[in-house]
Image (cartoon, coloured by chain):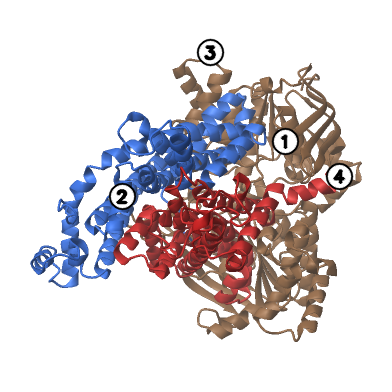
Amino acid sequence: MDAGSVILRKCLRALLTLWIVVSLTFVVLRSAGDPAIVILGSDATPAMIDAFHHQWGLDQPLPIQYVVYFAHILHGDFGSSFLDSRPALTVVAERIPRTLQLSGLGLLLMLCIGIPAGVAAALNRGRALDRVIVAASVMGHSVPSFFLAILLILLFSVRWRLLPSGGAEAAHTIIMPAITIAAGGTGVIARFTRAAMLDALRQPFVRAVQARGVGWPRVIRGHVMPNAAIPTVTMIGFLLGGLVAGAVITETVFAWPGIGWLIVTSVARRDLAVVQCIVLLVASTMVLANLIVDLLYVWLDPRMRAPAPEDA
Amino acid sequence: MSEAALLELRDLSVRFHTPEGVVEAVSGIDLTVRAGEILGLVGESGSGKSATCLAVMGLLGPRGETTGELRFQGRLIGADAARLRGHGIGMIFQEPRASLNPVFTIGHQLREVLALHRPDLTASAAADEASALLHRVGLPAPERQLRAYPHEISGGMAQRVAIALALAAQPRLLLADEPTTALDVTVQAQVLELLLRLRDETELAIVLVTHDLGIVARYADRVSVMRAGKVVEQASVQTLFAQPTHTYTRQLLDALPRMTERVAQVEAVPATPLLRVSGLTRHFVPRRRPFRRATPPLRAVDGVSFDIAAGETLALVGESGCGKSTTALMVAGLLGHTAGRIEFAGRDLATSSETQRRALRRELQIVLQDPGEALDPRLSCGTQVTEPLLIHRTGGNRQQRRETVRATLRSVGLDDWVIDRRPHEISGGQRQRVALARALVLQPRMLVLDEPTSALDVSIQAQVIDLLSRLQRERGLAYLFISHDLRLVLRIAHRVAVVYLGRIVELAEPAQLFAMPRHPYTKALLSAVPEPDPAQRGHQRILLPGEPPNPTAVAAGCRFRQRCALALPICAQVDPTLGQTSHDQAHQVACHVAQGTA
Amino acid sequence: MSATPLRAMGRRWPILVVLAFAWIGLCVVAAVLAPKLSPIDYQALDLRARLAPPLLFGGTWQHVLGTDEVGHDVFSRLLASMRVSLSVAFIGTLIGATLGTTLGFLAAHFRGWLDDVVMMLADAQAAIPFIIVALTIIAFFGTSLALFVVVVGLYGWQTYARLARAMALSTTRRGYVRAVVALGARPMRIYLRHVLPNVAGVLIVNATIGFPEVILLETALSFLGLGIQPPLSSLGSMLSYGRSYLGSAWWIAVLPGVVLSFCTLSVSLIGDWVRDRLDPILR
């Protein structure tokens, strides 16, 4: 059963990517000077520095350092935030739920608005609805999210005083950040769904299926959309990356206490243990998400279950 | 055959509204199809034959417009053509896999059509019916095919599935738009015989759209010839071939190469061959991927040997996947060979230095199959014909090079205006001539021609073949001519080699080959090619069972034995080699039965 | 042909695309001539004209687009910011495209382990949202301008690499390249004369998608205070600065935002148009 080998290969590839990311982080860490000073901060005592060197194997040759580093990472030890001396992982972990809330809502908005919009645009190609949707999508993609955030704040907080400009206390504070984070992605997914639908509609089998007497609504629902779903699913993987990037900016502008805001403040304050932790966490999540999307792709498209043809 | 017309088209016109203007694909045609008859609809590309079928089905799309009268079973089909789709009239298309949705199993798609047109069937009855349909179209192991996906089955099988899907709705009329053009010759025969059988069993009327007059001669009862959107002639098949009235029909018939023709003259062949190939082998070994079972190598070419003398044409014929194109690429130096020797003008290509090989490239050139592919879409034709001179830094100064290019283009029948044109601005036939000119500009001694006319219309094919013959006579060129079209090969080849699964199974002069084929595969191949002569309709056909085989799973012994009706025990053990038959020294066969070594 | 000449021309040059080109042209001119066009150095204080609104909202010609709290001229600052942002984005796109295409071609030509390495790096790059990568590098190595431009340039190289590789692989399989190889052409000639011209179109289209993304990355980082540092000003840092004045001088934030949006919009429109125009030729 060759689908099994295809799945196995994809899992291995994901692990390989993850390994490369961790290795590159190690490279960056080591090239930025003495990791002890980098992580502990400039006012660390020599005693602390020595202890750090010993704990992380920095007094050993480079390959051993690498292994020690890996071991620490696998145990969830990323160093301690020098601001409050707590383990970086703890600091990060307590901000994750907020980010999940915001991103989750954003993703929901993107899918629930973007996909139907794309389908509607494709089915009404060339007509007014199509043009409007495409225009809205292009604009959503062109306006930078931080500008959109500022415009929303300008209108709804400053001018009309309807919504608070930041924070996460009340339920309605999530509205503006959610809109901001979803805007760009909605446009992208609408255009992509539209393109996928148009592509599927152009396929020769559509005509053949009609020739067998299948009615147009069923052709769309039962034949075109399943084919269009395939490239759309791969888009979702790409969108998740956009969500993370969006979270960084949106959370910062709206003072939403998630890991996006955390990484910005940590970079500014050079709290590198936390930065390192966030980077690796985000990388693993993304790799996992992409793997899931990849596997979903194999499930949706039977042609993917055959092993890739070798170049002759 | 009943007299009442099943389908009647009166003054039918089809127009497409494109952004560039209105295009009239069909201009006021009259057509009738009676129950149980096979109507051949013949024409070259652009004649409007496909548009006619789509108009009948109501599948022209939003840009298409139909005017005129369409009657099916006496009733007018208007906007409710959709109602008839599938049920009264079915359609199958040229690309077999294009009819099938790639993400659903064949069983799913069959059940969908059955649920639509036979709602009286229960789920289990429908499943049985699906199996029965696949059985009816001659697919082995229907249960397994029901679970298969379209990409898992071959082209021939896919086309049969398409026919099964069409039959599921129990139509009275089937429109078949070039149903076998994309298939190999032997598979084509299988599918067409199937259509014939269906007609005989159920009085199914068929409109067989094709550009191949041979198919028409063998299978159609009546013929309508279309050109540029009009029907120029309509007659019974016998009348059409015996006494064609319209000039266009006569042109089509004349352009057709016939197997009984002998055009190529055998001149005195020089003693030393120009090209000598021995034991040429090419295996494709897939890249070792971790966690994958080692797949056996793909034995595309497995020990091929032949000689070609100056001024001689050797044709390699066979179906897709037999290795003929791979052989051509190896001879032309575009692909390395795994084993064997290639000697050109006495020099072994493998042991030559880089400079020697580069010099060799001037003598041996290749012309590829698809003229659209063969030329760079961004450069002008003149630039591309000049390029060989630039690469080899010959041809004198700019002025002299221009002259050479002009002369070469003229020798292939093209005027100077082509020089500044881009490939997409000229016709397919002209593109092929430009590609030919590019190959000729360095004055090579030999050309490898890989299916040089497959992508062209029949009338253009004839012109290109004549051009090649003329050039051969004038310049003493040797040709290695690759083709799947046996009829074509006759006009230009001095000798023909039949290739099957990477081996030459028969080698002879064309007259000998066609008059007395010795190898069972050759016999089946010849039998499968429809001859444009209605008088031969009743002849017994040799139908090869099964599909052209997989080059990774080559059986022991004779590789043809699994499909061979004459297989003997020795065929399973010993691989036959190419050897002479008792009668004729020049006629060689690789078959135990034919060689009498059984 | 029933199309009138005007309509035919309208089809070749849609009005939106013309406007997009005009806008981009204007921005390029403004960016190049920024020092000459600004009435005053944007860092000059003018305490007598604090918080002056732009011209159409009650302002004067002296400060066409208004001033901020200490009298900095907004118009001058806008021009200077456009200059920085557009230059960084342009150089960044160039770096990414050149690096990516070269790696892609090398991977396609040599195959084997080089191909595998390049593809693995591309995968790794694609796995993480680039802003996180950029933030990490800035965190570890600081905010020097040169480093920032290099980081921005690394954005998206993997898309160019994947595209260049895929197109090189498919182009070298095509009939006309094989024919030229059969004629004895050397690889360099093949890549320069036959592969690159056919690939260029796709790469250019990708650049028109990439350029807006690069400029958005730069402005986002500058907005967060981690990109372009004072005394230089970017559209992003100007927006960030203006955020504090939303109540009193909203134009300081809105104007750079509008300029930025129009720039990305224009490049996207031009990119779509280029892609549509390339298709028929390639067919």
Does the residue at mark 2 contact the one at mark 4 (Cβ under 8 Å)? no
Q: First in sequence, mark 4 or 1: give its number.
A: 1
Amino acid type at mark 4 = Thr
Q: Which mark is residue B208?
A: 1
Residue that label 4 marks: B249
Tell me the CA gap for discs 3 and 4.
48 Å
Give the x, y percent position of residue A238: 43, 47
Output the chain of dot 1. Answer: B
Q: Which chain is red?
A: C
Q: Nearer the viewer, mark 2 or mark 3?
A: 2
**Label 3 in the same subunit as label 1:** yes
Amino acid type at mark 1 = Leu
Chain A: its colour in the image is blue
Give the x, y percent position of residue A279: 29, 54
Q: Which residue is painted at 10% across and 69% down in the image?
A: A46
Q: Secondary structure at mark 1?
A: strand
Chain B: its colour in the image is brown
Residue that label 3 marks: B120
Residue that label 2 marks: A282
